[in-house]
Image (cartoon, rainbow, N blue to C red):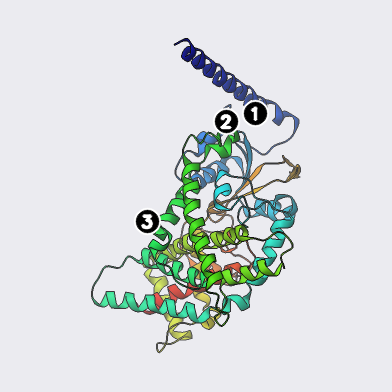
Amino acid sequence: MGFRVFCSNSMTLIWGTLVVFLFVYSLYVLLNIHKRKRFPPSPTGFPILGHLHLLAGKNPHNDLQKLAKKHGPIMYVQLGLVPAIVASSVDAVEKFLKTNDHIFASRPHSEASQYLSYGQKNLIFAKYGVYWRNMRKLCTVHLLSNHKINSFQSMRKQEVQLLIESIKKEAHDRVVVDLSARILSLNANLTCLMMFGKKYMDEDLDKRGFKAIVQDVVDLVSTPNLGDFFPFLGVIDLQGLNRKLKDLSKVFDEFLERIIDEHVEYHDRDQTKDFVDTMMDIMQSGEAEFQFDRRHIKAILLDMLLAAMDTTASTAEWILTELLRHPQVMKKLQNELQEVVGLERMVEESDLENLNYLNMVVNEGLRLHPAVPLFFHEAMEDCVVDDFHIQKGSRIIINCYAIHRDPNVWPDPEKFFPGRFVGTLHQKRPLAAIDFSFSGNSYCHKYIYRHLIKCHWIQCR
């Protein structure tokens, strides 16, 4: 009995001391550090929590947009023990990612990155440095070159046509079609064919299926993790998020290991090399300027698999939804398809560069519905931006959602109006259309089958 009381009192003392320490530390940060250096404007915060209470809604990009309207396009927020700067305008983003890109090129550590990137060995979560530059070079040259992407052209054409034919048949039979599920399935098939050389059924990954697993990952990554804001809580895992991430990473790891083993055992040199073949060749040749093993291969494969299946599907779905909401835009797009392609055949990849209005529609869809409304960078050293002090280790939050709805840049920003891109396709491109992890060519394969899906679907209406 006495021992239990002693343990209880000891734990109370430990937690009490910890709370007092955090309170004093947070109070010091909030009241003193800003007096010494000029920080960006900031809303009122609380000790320990900082401004986390202001971002408690389901859509933090909306919350940050509202705060930016009051405090400005460069805003300071304290996320627990983590300082953060929110950029909510084009000018602000340029100052961070263009003028000072050498300082803000890195990605911050997160609990999710430990489980979904094999210890930040991928590109999305990797720290900026020699490793990231070398890995990016390998991906750009060997996986995402125009030659590599074009080698899968016939496969993409075949898969898109199979989808359209099945939808036409079901429409003829008056069967309800879940277009979202079909687009996700197409993305999974195209991605698996390019990456692994063959299609995989849902149950090949897990009994829950591709869609459910990817959605679980998206939900976990988008859920605020206390360990990201209070690093000492990461080990405790109060929310159980790390345990779930660990379980999901095991599912993906076993799946990717099986795929690599299949390639080692049944390698066919007469077939077009998929991404696994290419990376296995790099590993065996010793071409990489760093240690390159199966962990790096799996990290890059998981990067591409999750990005293609989640962001591409959601973007295509939103754009098709906007077309249904705006029949006049749909009609204008159909007219362009008839003029450029005609009624005798389906759209092909070679037609895409001549479909100007289609490009406007896609850009407008990306502006209104960015697949990733917030993305994060990290300050690698102390610096000054726009006369504001930015301390080393600060998270830089780019609010694409707010930038795309800035009335100073986009008149009637809430309106779906593709015509706003007339004559500005290259000068005025949504941030969501730019891939900040890979080279510009990484956008190429997403661009192609996003456009083909929409073109074929519109032709069939």
Q: Residues within 10 Å of mark 3 (few under 14, many from 20)?
A: few
**Residue 104 in view of the camera:** yes
The picture places residue 302, in percent across and down from the top left corner, at: 54, 59
Whichever of labels 2 and 1 marks the residue nearer the N terminus, that label is: 1
Q: In the rendered structure, find residue 208 and report the number of the disc placed on it.
A: 3
**Direction from residue 291 to residue 428 in the image, left or right:** left
What residue lies at 60% left-to-right and 67% top-to-bottom?
Answer: 442
Query: Which mark is in front, 3 or 2?
Result: 3
* Quadrant placement of the N terminus: top left
**Residue 413 in view of the camera:** no
What residue lies at 53% left-to-right and 71% top-to-bottom?
Answer: 265
Answer whether labels 3 and 2 touch (C-beta < 8 Å): no
What residue lies at 74% left-to-right and 52% top-to-bottom?
Answer: 100
Residue at which label 1 appears = 30
Instruction: Please identify the residue farthest to the bottom as the structure is shown.
Output: 344
**Can you tell which quarter of the image residue 441 is in?**
bottom right
Answer whether labels 2 and 1 touch (C-beta < 8 Å): yes
**Direction from residue 377 to residue 336 in the image, left or right:** left
Q: Amino acid at mark 2?
A: Gly
Instruction: Please identify the residue farthest to the front as the structure is shown.
Output: 265
Identify the secondary structure beneath mark 1. Answer: helix
From mark 3 to mark 2, how far is it between C-alphas?
42 Å
Residue 331 higher or lower than 261, as above or below: below
Question: In this orientation, which residue lies closer to the viewer: 17 or 324?
Answer: 17
Q: Residues within 10 Å of mark 2 (few under 14, many from 20)?
A: some
Question: In this orientation, which residue lies closer to the viewer: 372 or 334?
Answer: 372
Residue at which label 2 appears = 45
Whichever of labels 3 and 1 marks the residue nearer the N terminus, that label is: 1
Residue 376 higher or lower than 445, as above or below: above
